Amino acid sequence: MKRIVVYCASSSRVNEQYFMYTGLLSEFLVKNNYEVVYGGGAVGLMGKLADTVLEHGGTITGVIPYFMSDREWAHTGLSKLLYVNTMHERKHKMLENTDGLIALPGGTGTLEELLEAITLKRLGLYTKPIVILNTNNYYDPLKKMFEKCMHENFMNDKHRLMWKFVDTPEEVVTALNEVPSWDSNAIDYAVVK
Ligand code: AMP
């Protein structure tokens, strides 16, 4: 069974389409035999992800810091819930032994997790596919920002291969299988020369 980490929003006040796409994606992941890892929350898109995976008989592991579970933010019905001390540890744990990463729309938490993973990939420390679900064109500004980074030589053109934006949940699983492999020697071209 492949293991996939999903980063997504904790907010519950987002447009229904974000919930719908999160639900559809969760179903596809279960159907395609992916075990899911995520931040362990019960609300927002995080809650929708977990509820849908569980409804469809899938396996989902949450990784949550003690200070969040103390506030009763953790989902109580997960297949497995891992506790960590810090946000740093959580990010490390979530990414560990995964076969790929999916970012759904989210706020600063999601953006931070996604950008850290891309940074690790640039250094060859994470080599798995990174797929960004651009529901409702939410991530267009980020796509533009990445293009600007490359255009202004803050990144190399080949860094574009580190991520893949897709528009629908259906395309995510295909993208996970088709993203070109990335090698641990990426550090050799991490620096723009
Ligand atoms: P955001 O994309 O800003 O909503 O952040 C999602 C991330 O925020 C998660 O991975 C957590 O780090 C954190 N987070 C914020 N609120 C919660 C919550 N209620 N339950 C669990 N994690 C949360």
Image (tube, grey):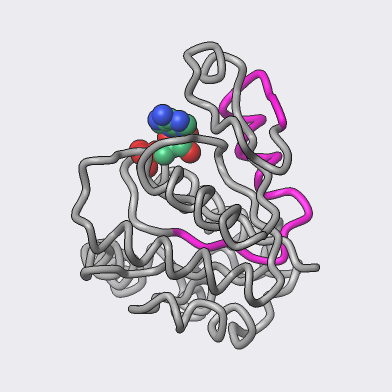
Which of these two is toward me, 23 or 2?
23
- Where residue 101 appears, x then y in whole percent? 58, 62
Ligand 1 positioned in quadrant: top left
Q: Residue at x 32, y 64 (%)?
A: 20
The answer to whether residue 127 is left or right of residue 103 is right
The answer to whether residue 29 is left or right of residue 157 is right
Residue numbers of the magenta segment = 82-103
- Where residue 64 appears, x then y in whole percent? 60, 29
**Quarter occupied by the N terminus:** bottom right
Q: Quadrant of residue 127?
A: bottom right
The reply to whether the magenta stretch includes residue 98 is yes
Which of these two is toward me, 89 or 162?
89
The answer to whether residue 8 is left or right of residue 183 is left
The reply to whether the magenta stretch includes residue 169 is no
Which of these two is toward me, 47 or 136?
47
Q: Is residue 181 above or below residue 150?
A: below
Q: Quadrant of residue 85?
A: top right
Task: Report the number of discs.
Answer: 0
- Where residue 147 appears, x then y in whole percent? 30, 73
Q: Residue at x 78, y 54 (%)?
A: 97
Q: Is residue 145 above or below residue 92?
A: below
Q: Residue at x 64, y 40 (%)?
A: 78
Which of these two is toward me, 122 or 54?
54
Q: Residue at x 50, y 70 (%)?
A: 131
- Where residue 23 appears, x then y in whole percent? 42, 62
Q: Quadrant of residue 76?
A: top right
